[in-house]
Image (cartoon, helix red, strand yellow):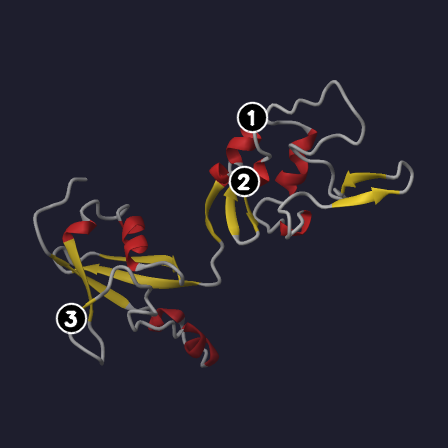
């Protein structure tokens, strides 16, 4: 989306949209140009700060920004236009962190056994069922009133541990096996069943 700017930095996902809303102009362009990409190479993994180099002409330590100077990076020489009106530079500001970069995503079908509605959602392999449940609230505001179960070769209607991932609940990701056999991924999407458990939760 043209009004969104998300990047990844050392395994974290940052939403820089608010930053760009407040900082328009040339310094925003390097960030906009790398929207949707990993920008860890801009920073020192040890310090978490912008990489630096020694300028041979001035023999001073300078920010290394071959992509162009960007927001919160000071100019190479003192300037009246430079305003350091921020507590922390955006790359060290936790407020922009919205999550972790996943190693892999997978599909999951959630079936409500009370209404017989099915929803297919894309989840991160690292997410617990409780985290998945939080996102499933967009489809069912009372998802917390349901017990999440799984029926497979191991057991019929076994109750799942909401604090564990799908894999930890013995629901492996077999998409790579199906892909190797050129079988459509629709055939390898696992289903969890929601059984109504108690009074409706507050929406």
**156 versus 137 height, above or below:** below
**Residue 203, quarter of the rendered image:** top left
Tell me which numbered mark, 1 or 2, is placed earlier along the sequence. 2
How many C-alpha atoms fall within 10 Å of the one at disc 1: few (<14), some, or many (≥20)? Answer: few
Picture mark count: 3
Disc 1 on helix, strand or loop? helix
Q: Residue at x 26, y 66 (%)?
A: 191
Residue 13 position within the rendered picture, expressed as x and y whole percent measured from the top left: 50, 48
Label 1 to label 3: alpha-carbon separation: 51 Å
Tell me which numbered mark, 2 or 3, is placed earlier along the sequence. 2
Tell me which numbered mark, 1 or 3, is placed earlier along the sequence. 1
**Residue position for label 2:** 5
Disc 3 on helix, strand or loop? loop
Label 1 to label 2: alpha-carbon separation: 13 Å
Q: Is residue 170 left or right of residue 122?
A: left
**Residue 122, quarter of the rendered image:** bottom left
**173 versus 67 height, above or below:** below
How many C-alpha atoms fall within 10 Å of the one at disc 2: few (<14), some, or many (≥20)? Answer: many
How many C-alpha atoms fall within 10 Å of the one at disc 3: few (<14), some, or many (≥20)? Answer: some
Residue 22 is tagged as 1
Disc 2 on helix, strand or loop? loop
**Residue position for label 3:** 157
**Residue 81, quarter of the rendered image:** top right
Residue 182 position within the rendered picture, expressed as x and y whole percent measured from the top left: 45, 78
Label 2 to label 3: alpha-carbon separation: 42 Å
Q: Nearer the viewer, residue 163 or 105?
A: 163
Residue 83 position within the rendered picture, expressed as x and y whole percent measured from the top left: 66, 22
């Amino acid at each position: 989306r043209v009004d969104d700017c998300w990047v990844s930095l050392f395994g974290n996902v940052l939403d820089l949209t608010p930053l760009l809303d407040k900082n328009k102009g040339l310094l925003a362009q390097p960030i906009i140009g790398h929207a949707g990409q990993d920008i860890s190479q801009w920073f020192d993994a040890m310090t978490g700060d912008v990489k630096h180099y020694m300028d041979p002409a001035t023999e001073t330590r300078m920010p290394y920004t071959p992509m162009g100077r960007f927001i919160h990076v000071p100019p190479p020489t003192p300037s009246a236009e430079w305003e350091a009106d921020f507590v922390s530079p955006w790359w060290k500001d936790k407020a922009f962190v919205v999550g972790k970069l996943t190693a892999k995503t997978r599909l999951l079908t959630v079936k409500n056994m009370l209404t017989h509605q099915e929803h297919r959602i894309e989840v991160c392999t690292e997410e617990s069922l409780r985290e998945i449940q939080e996102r499933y609230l967009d489809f069912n505001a009372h998802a917390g009133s349901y017990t999440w179960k799984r029926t497979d070769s191991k057991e019929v209607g076994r109750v799942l541990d909401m604090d564990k991932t799908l894999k930890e609940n013995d629901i492996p990701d077999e998409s790579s096996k199906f892909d190797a056999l050129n079988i459509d991924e629709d055939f390898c999407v696992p289903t969890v069943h929601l059984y109504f458990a108690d009074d409706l939760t507050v929406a």
